[in-house]
Image (cartoon, grey):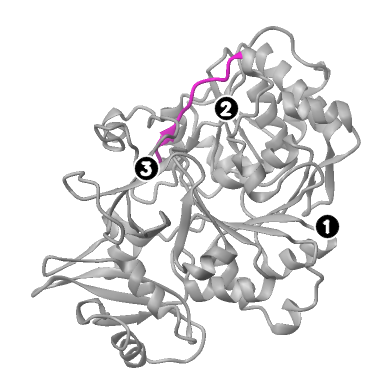
C-alpha cells in the first residue's frame, strides 16, 4: 500500500489499471483514495489487525480497491473463485475465519448460502458504505495485511497459506521478492496484460507488482484469444502472463487473425502454472520471438526457477535454475541424487510457510534439513537446470516401474493432429496400471495412428494401451490439469 501511495503522490493522474470490459480506468490517485476509504470503513467496523475478509469478485475495480484497503487496515484478504461450489466456499470461509464476504449481485444466491458470514455486494451497498470516509492515509501504527491465498484444491479441498502481517516499520519495503523486476524488466512505464482471474495467485500478485512500481495493468474480464492479441496492439502491451492452454488457443486462431495485429511492443510473455508441451512453446517462440519467460513456483512461495527462451531452446522442457536459494533432488530415503536421476524436488534457501490449520501437511512439506517441496518430481542436469517429471500422485506404476505421464504427453503433443493430451494410469490386471491417453484432436486421426506414433518414440511400457478422444480436458481456472477427474472417469 505505501508503494501505491507513492505512485499516487508522484503521478496521480497516471493509469494504474484499465478494465477492458467496461473501459474503466483507475488512476493511481483514485485507487489510492478509494482504498483509503475502504481501510477507514473496515477499521470503523471493528476489524482488528490479522482478521480477514473474503472477496468473491470477478475482474472488477472493487477487487483492487478492497484488496489494497484491507491490507492497509492490517487485514488478511482471501480471494475466492466465482466458480466455486457452496461446499468449497463454506470451507474456505470457515477455515480462513473471514469476518466479511464481499461479492457481486450476480453471485447473490451463492453468498446467501453462507449465512454464517455477513456479506455486502458491490454497487450501491458498497458505495454507500465507503461514502464519506476519509480519502487520506489512515493514522496509527497498524501493520500491513497480506493476501491469504488458498491452493487450487486439485486433489481435495483448498488449503490456506497464511503469512505473518508486515510490521508497520517495514511498510515502505516491497512485499514481494525483487528479483522479478530484474528478471522480467518491470518498472515504471510497463504495460501488463492480465488475461486471467484476479482471484488466482499469479495474476493477483503481478497486477499489484505492476501498479506498485508505476506500471499500468490492463485487465481482461476473461481470456479470449483474438481479443488478447487486439489488446496487446491497442494498449502497446510490454508484459503479459499466460498458461499453456492459452497458448494452444492462440495458436489455433486463423492465420489472418494471428497476423492482423502489431505486437512489436510486447517484450516479455511470462508463463507458468502447468507444463507447456514443447512443440507448443516452440511454435509460440517462432511466432512472438524469444520473449517467453517461464517460471516454476507455487503459492507456498518456497522457491522459484526461471528460464528464458534462448536457454529453453537449448534445453527444451526445462523450467530453469533457481532465482534464489537452491534446488535438490532426492530419492525415497531423502538421499540426494546426482544429475540426470529423477526424484523429489526440494527447495532450500527460501522463506518458510505453513498450511493453515494443517500441521501434518505442513510437516510433510519439509524434511529434516529444512528443505521444502511442492510434491513434484524432476531431475537436474549438469548445469543445475531443473526438468519436471510429474507430481508424485500422478505417477503410473506399471509392473513396479515408475512411468511419468508428462514424458508420454510431450511425445503425443508433437503429433500434428493433437491439440491437447493428458495421460493417466488405467487399471490393468497384469501390470497394475497401464498408460491411457485422453486426446483433444486438432485434425482427424485414429487411436491406432497415435499409438504407432508413440511406439516409435517411447519404450514399450510407456506406450498408451488405450486412446480416448475428448472434446476438452478438465482444467482449473489457473490452467492446471484436473487429472483426478480423468482418473475418476476413465481410470
Point out residue 319 in the picture as x, y percentages from the top left corner.
Answer: 47, 58
Q: Is residue 164 magenta?
A: yes
Between circles 3 and 2, the one closer to the viewer is 2
Give the labeled residue for mark 1. Answer: 235
Quadrant in which the N terminus is drawn: top right
Return the disc, 3 or 2, that comes first in the chain's sequence.
2
Decide: is 423 above or below 342: below
Give the labeled residue for mark 3. Answer: 157
Residue range in magenta is: 158-167
Classify mark 1: helix, strand or loop. Answer: loop
Quadrant in which the C terminus is drawn: bottom left
The foreground one among 79 and 161 is 161
Other-residue count near label 2 (Cα within 10 Å), few / some / many at <14 / 14–19 / ≥20: many
User: Which disc number belongs to residue 203?
Assistant: none
Q: Please identify the quarter of the rendering in which residue 424 is found.
A: bottom left
Position of 449 compared to 313: left or right? left
Q: Residue reaching furthest front?
A: 382
Classify mark 2: helix, strand or loop. Answer: loop
Quote the CA–CA distance across marks 1 and 3: 38 Å
Return the disc, 1 or 2, that comes first in the chain's sequence.
2
Point out residue 165 in the picture as x, y percentages from the top left corner.
Answer: 54, 20
The reply to whether dot 3 and dot 2 touch (C-beta < 8 Å) is: no
Q: Please identify the quarter of the rendering in which residue 73 is found.
A: top right
Give the labeled residue for mark 2. Answer: 146
Other-residue count near label 3 (Cα within 10 Å), few / some / many at <14 / 14–19 / ≥20: some
Decide: is 305 above or below 175: below
Point out residue 351 in the picture as x, y percentages from the top left corner.
Answer: 45, 31
Between circles 1 and 3, the one closer to the viewer is 1
Return the disc, 1 or 3, that comes first in the chain's sequence.
3
Amino acid at each position: 500500500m505505501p508503494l501505491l501511495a507513492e505512485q499516487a503522490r508522484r503521478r496521480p493522474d497516471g493509469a494504474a489499471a484499465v478494465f477492458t470490459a467496461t473501459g474503466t480506468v483507475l488512476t493511481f490517485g483514485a485507487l489510492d483514495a478509494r482504498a483509503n476509504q475502504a481501510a477507514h470503513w473496515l477499521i470503523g467496523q471493528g476489524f482488528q489487525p490479522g482478521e480477514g475478509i473474503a472477496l468473491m469478485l470477478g475482474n472488477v475495480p472493487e477487487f483492487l480497491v478492497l484488496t489494497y484497503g484491507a491490507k492497509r487496515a492490517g487485514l488478511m484478504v482471501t480471494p475466492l473463485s466465482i466458480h466455486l461450489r457452496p461446499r468449497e466456499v463454506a470451507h474456505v470461509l470457515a477455515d480462513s475465519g473471514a469476518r466479511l464476504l464481499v461479492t457481486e449481485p450476480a453471485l447473490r444466491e451463492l453468498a446467501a448460502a453462507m449465512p454464517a458470514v455477513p456479506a455486502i455486494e458491490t454497487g450501491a451497498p458498497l458505495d454507500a458504505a465507503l461514502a464519506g470516509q476519509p480519502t487520506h492515509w489512515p493514522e496509527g501504527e497498524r501493520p500491513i495485511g497480506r493476501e491469504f491465498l488458498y491452493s487450487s484444491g486439485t486433489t481435495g479441498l483448498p488449503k490456506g497459506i497464511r503469512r505473518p502481517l508486515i510490521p508497520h516499520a517495514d511498510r515502505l519495503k516491497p512485499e514481494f521478492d525483487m528479483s522479478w523486476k530484474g528478471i522480467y524488466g518491470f518498472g515504471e512505464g510497463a504495460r501488463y496484460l492480465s488475461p486471467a482471474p484476479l482471484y488466482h495467485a499469479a495474476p493477483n500478485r503481478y497486477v499489484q507488482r505492476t501498479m506498485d512500481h508505476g506500471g499500468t495493468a490492463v485487465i481482461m474480464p476473461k481470456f479470449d484469444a483474438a481479443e488478447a492479441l487486439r489488446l496487446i496492439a491497442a494498449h502497446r502491451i510490454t508484459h503479459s502472463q499466460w498458461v499453456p492452454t492459452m497458448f494452444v488457443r492462440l495458436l489455433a486462431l486463423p492465420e489472418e487473425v494471428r497476423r492482423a495485429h502489431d505486437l512489436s511492443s510486447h517484450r516479455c510473455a511470462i508463463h507458468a502454472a502447468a507444463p507447456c508441451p514443447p512443440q507448443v512453446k516452440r511454435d509460440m517462440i517462432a511466432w512472438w520471438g524469444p520473449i517467453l519467460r517461464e517460471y516454476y513456483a507455487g503459492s507456498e512461495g518456497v522457491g522459484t526457477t526461471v528460464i528464458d527462451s534462448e536457454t529453453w531452446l537449448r534445453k527444451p522442457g526445462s523450467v530453469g535454475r533457481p532465482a534464489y536459494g537452491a534446488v535438490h533432488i532426492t530419492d525415497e530415503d531423502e538421499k540426494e541424487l546426482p544429475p540426470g536421476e529423477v526424484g523429489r524436488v526440494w527447495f532450500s534457501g527460501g522463506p518458510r510457510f505453513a498450511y493453515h490449520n494443517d500441521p501434518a501437511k505442513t510437516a510433510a512439506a519439509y524434511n529434516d534439513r529444512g528443505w521444502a517441496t511442492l510434491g513434484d518430481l524432476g531431475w537436474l542436469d549438469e548445469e543445475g537446470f531443473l526438468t519436471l517429471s510429474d507430481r508424485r500422485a500422478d505417477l503410473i506404476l506399471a509392473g513396479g516401474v515408475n512411468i511419468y505421464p508428462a514424458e508420454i504427453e510431450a511425445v503425443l503433443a508433437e503429433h500434428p493432429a493433437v491439440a491437447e493430451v493428458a495421460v493417466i494410469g488405467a487399471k490393468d490386471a497384469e501390470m497394475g496400471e497401464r498408460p491411457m491417453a485422453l486426446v483433444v484432436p486438432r485434425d482427424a486421426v485414429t487411436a491406432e495412428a497415435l499409438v504407432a506414433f508413440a511406439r516409435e518414440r517411447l519404450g514399450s511400457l510407456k506406450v498408451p494401451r488405450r486412446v480416448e478422444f475428448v472434446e476438452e480436458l478438465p482444467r482449473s481456472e489457473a490452467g492446471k490439469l484436473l487429472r483426478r477427474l480423468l482418473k475418476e472417469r476413465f481410470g
